[in-house]
């Protein structure tokens, strides 16, 4: 079993479902409301853990009931939380999620996630160095992301960056990362609007581009490989990208090839979208077999 360390966000997701997405200035009557533990970091940790990886989380929550709920949930999902810091200065991160028209829209209030700093990383450097792979997203300060990638690169620890939510990445960060998993929108923002295939050719076996219902693309060193998505009845797409990243990492650390890992992660992400919620929809190994 490989060891994964996720450095990232922990949020409480407030999920509203509705038949119709409200336009600006409009009020609509919705269907359901749920409070579901989320955050791209925590989601990826749960995805990896449910699929068999020995998973640790480095992050921050507030000293409040959402923080307690999130930590308990991570522990229930067998994610080790000894490196999650409880901070007094800010509340646990929140996400307002609207699920309508087969898609979601999300507003994140980072709260305690933005209290992550280099000191939190220094305190947990030994844990980072013990990882078979480190996973990062962009819901914590960019300087922390860059610091972690520097440590990983200096110490030859594999690091996967999921550049979500979309933000520009420094060229040096791109060079130092082992894997980068943008969706098409994130890819365009990071690579100056270049076409997907043109960018893939520049970063073989590093860049893995997710394309929603059209599947996943990467360059294997010889050619561009395309893995189609599995056809499923979509209930909620929230967390599909996170499931993909957690599952990809879990497969890579157990020794799968990139091709095998991408196929496995694609299958896991397809499973997630058939259920409501990010973490609540994620599969276990048995579900995928
Ligand atoms: O990727 C989905 C996640 O984005 C949600 O769980 C929400 O918390 C936001 O971080």
Image (tube, rainbow, N blue to C red):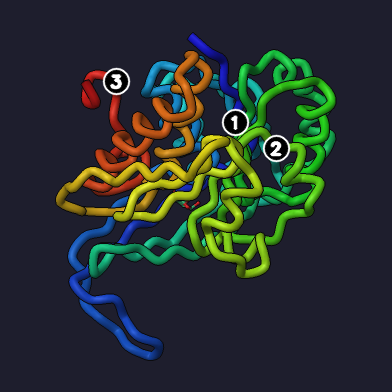
Could you tell me how far apart the alpha carbons at marks 1 and 3 are, in whole angstroms?
20 Å
- Determine which quarter of the picture holds residue 230: top left
| Disc 2 target residue | 177
Where does residue 111 sit, x and y in percent of width and height?
63, 54
Mark 2 vs ligand 1: CB under 8 Å? no
Residue 67 in sight here:
no
Viewer-nearest residue: 106 or 112: 106
Q: Please tell me whether mark 2 or mark 3 is closer to you in this view.
A: 2
Where does residue 128 sit, x and y in percent of width and height?
71, 22
Mark 1 vs ligand 1: CB under 8 Å? no
Q: Say whether disc 2 or disc 3 marks the residue closer to the N-terminus.
A: 2
Residue furthest out toward the bottom? 25
Where does residue 190 sit, x and y in percent of width and height?
66, 60
Residue furthest out toward the front? 222
- Determine which quarter of the picture holds residue 162: top right
Viewer-nearest residue: 183 or 45: 183
In the displayed structure, 69 sits above or below 89; it is: above
The 10 Å Cα crowd at callout 2, few under 14, some 14 to 19, many 20 or more, is: many
Q: Is residue 250 left or right of residue 125?
A: left
Where does residue 277 sit, x and y in percent of width and height?
31, 47
The 10 Å Cα crowd at callout 1, few under 14, some 14 to 19, many 20 or more, is: many
Q: In this view, does 255 lie to the left or right of 243?
A: right
Q: Which mark is residue 6?
A: 1
């Amino acid at each position: 079993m490989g060891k994964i360390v996720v450095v990232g966000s922990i949020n409480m997701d407030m999920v509203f479902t509705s038949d119709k997405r409200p336009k600006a200035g409009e009020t609509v009557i919705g269907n359901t409301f749920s409070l579901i533990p989320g955050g791209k970091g925590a989601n990826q940790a749960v995805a990896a853990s449910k699929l068999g990886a020995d998973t640790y989380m480095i992050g921050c929550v507030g000293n409040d009931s959402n923080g307690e709920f999130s930590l308990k949930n991570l522990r229930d999902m067998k994610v080790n939380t000894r490196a999650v810091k409880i901070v007094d200065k800010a509340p646990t991160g929140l996400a307002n999620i609207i699920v309508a028209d087969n898609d979601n829209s999300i507003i994140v209030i980072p709260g305690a996630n933005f209290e992550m700093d280099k000191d939190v990383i220094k305190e947990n450097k030994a844990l980072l160095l013990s990882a078979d792979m480190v996973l990062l997203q962009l819901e914590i300060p960019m300087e922390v992301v860059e610091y972690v990638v520097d440590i990983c690169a200096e110490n030859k620890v594999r690091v996967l960056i999921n550049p979500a939510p979309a933000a520009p990445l420094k060229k040096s960060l791109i060079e130092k990362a082992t894997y980068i998993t943008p969706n098409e929108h994130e890819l365009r923002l990071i690579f100056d609007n270049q076409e997907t295939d043109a960018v893939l050719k520049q970063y073989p076996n590093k860049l893995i581009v997710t394309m929603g219902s059209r599947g996943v693309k990467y360059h294997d060193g010889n050619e561009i490989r395309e893995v189609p998505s599995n056809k499923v009845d979509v209930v909620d797409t929230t967390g599909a990208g996170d499931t993909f990243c957690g599952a990809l990492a879990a497969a890579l650390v157990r020794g799968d090839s990139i091709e095998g890992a991408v196929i496995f992660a694609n299958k896991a992400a397809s499973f997630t979208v058939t259920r409501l919620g990010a973490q609540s929809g994620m599969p276990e190994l048995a579900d995928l077999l």
